[in-house]
Image (cartoon, rainbow, N blue to C red):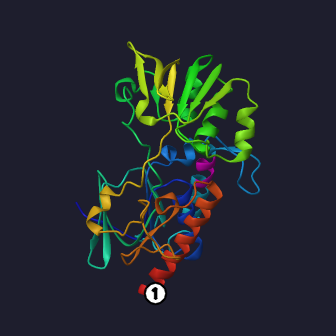
């Protein structure tokens, strides 16, 4: 199978990666750009209501991803090829596949998906932070039987039911606020002393009559139970065994960046497990950039978009110096 060539490959098509696409195209519309990943499965698409994007009152995460992809599709048809055989068109291509390997190929990079191999002069990694799965007793047994890893994705399926969310941070807060429209009771099991979310969200949570937060619940004490479907979750509180009945358990824990597909590149990693970069989003591998939560940025859509845009600009500057 022949390899497909491009100038810039972007691995990860959430708000960070799509912002990098827009930045790179606007800076140099002659570059061939390929973006890999399933946009509607990205962390942004799973966020529910987003209310902190300047100039945007409120938008659901999946709708925002759709707006970004539509904007990119308009860019990709902005100019027409000078020659019918011009291989530079389409300039931008969103490839709905995940990358399975990334390696160097001389001074370039080889990117492989399940169906195709690509060669690119520069790469931006913007894959975000994956879900942490398989950490709770009974979790794997009850997946699709009352265990879910996305409250926003599956919450509407449990109208009038009792729900539990496990985790911390804004993702849990947004998930609970989304669920309050559907579920009659939501309990948040938090393993830290605070929920570690924005105070605006916390105020909404604490004034919601159907939401309760339980703190300092050890993750290793949790156990999902049921017969053929979820019936509840067990946990320890100050060494006392507790049991909470529930129809659905949403496990919203986050892992460190997954870079198994790039393990041959020997990327430098920070003490916290993120990909190490400089102020230009460059890694220790020439031509390889990282943007967003994969390099430890905070999980706020405006920050992630800005970081993706910045990486796109610096990647183009790298390509222009290289040519």
Residue 155's spot in the image, x, y percent? Answer: 57, 28
Above or below: residue 37 compared with residue 183: below
Residue drawn at 73 percent across, 24 percent down: 209
- Where residue 93 sits: x, y (%)? 46, 60
16 in magenta: no
Q: Please, is residue 252 above or below residue 308 in the view?
A: above
Q: Which residue is found at the position 55% from the left and 61% from the top?
A: 297
Say if 297 sits above or below 47 in the image: below
Q: Give whichever of 172, 43 is nearer the camera.
A: 172
Secondary structure found at label 1? helix
Q: Is residue 60 above or below residue 139?
A: below
Q: Give neighbour class at mark 1: few <14, some 14-19, many 20+ (Cα, 10 Å).
A: few
In the picture, which quadrant includes the N terminus?
A: bottom left
Q: Residue furthest toward the front? A: 239
Asked if residue 258 lies left or right of residue 172, the reply is left
Residue that mark 1 sits on: 321
Residue closer to the observer: 304 or 77? 304
Q: Is residue 224 left or right of residue 153?
A: left
Asked whether 159 or 1 is in front, the reply is 159
- Would residue 290 be seen by someone viewing this image from the given angle? yes
Q: Which residues are magenta?
A: 64-68
Q: Give residue 230's position: percent from left, percent from top.
A: 44, 18
Residue 277 shown left or right of residue 216 in the figure: left
Residue 122 lies in what quarter of the image?
Answer: bottom left
Q: Residue at x 59, y 41 (%)?
A: 193
Q: Assign the C terminus to one quadrant of the image.
A: bottom left
Q: Is residue 67 magenta?
A: yes
């Amino acid at each position: 199978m022949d390899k497909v060539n491009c100038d810039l490959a972007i691995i990860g098509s959430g708000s960070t990666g799509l912002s990098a696409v827009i930045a790179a195209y606007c800076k140099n519309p002659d570059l061939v750009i390929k973006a890999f990943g399933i946009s509607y499965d990205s962390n942004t698409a799973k966020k529910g209501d987003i209310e902190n994007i300047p100039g945007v009152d409120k938008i659901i995460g999946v709708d925002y991803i759709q707006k970004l992809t539509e904007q990119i599709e308009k860019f990709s048809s902005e100019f027409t090829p000078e020659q019918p055989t011009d291989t530079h068109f389409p300039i931008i291509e969103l490839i709905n596949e995940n990358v399975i390997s990334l390696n160097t190929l001389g001074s370039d990079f080889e990117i492989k998906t399940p169906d195709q191999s690509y060669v690119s002069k520069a790469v931006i990694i913007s894959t975000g932070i994956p879900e942490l799965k398989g950490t709770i007793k009974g979790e794997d047994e009850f997946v699709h039987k009352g265990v879910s890893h996305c409250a926003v994705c599956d919450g509407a399926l449990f109208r009038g039911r009792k729900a539990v969310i496990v985790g911390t941070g804004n993702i849990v807060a947004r998930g609970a606020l989304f669920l309050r429209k559907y579920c009659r009771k939501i309990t948040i099991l938090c393993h830290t002393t605070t929920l570690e979310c924005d105070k605006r969200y916390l105020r909404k949570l604490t004034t919601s009559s159907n939401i309760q937060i339980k703190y300092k619940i050890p993750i290793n004490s949790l156990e999902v139970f049921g017969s053929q479907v979820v019936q509840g979750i067990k946990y320890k509180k100050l060494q006392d065994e507790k049991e909470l009945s529930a129809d659905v358990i949403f496990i919203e824990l986050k892992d460190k960046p997954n870079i198994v597909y790039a393990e041959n590149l020997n990327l430098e990693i920070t003490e916290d497990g993120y990909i190490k970069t400089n102020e230009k989003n460059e890694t220790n591998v020439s031509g390889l950039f990282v943007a967003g939560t994969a390099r430890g940025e905070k999980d706020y859509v405006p920050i992630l978009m800005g970081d993706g845009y910045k990486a796109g600009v610096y990647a183009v500057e790298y390509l222009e110096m290289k040519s």
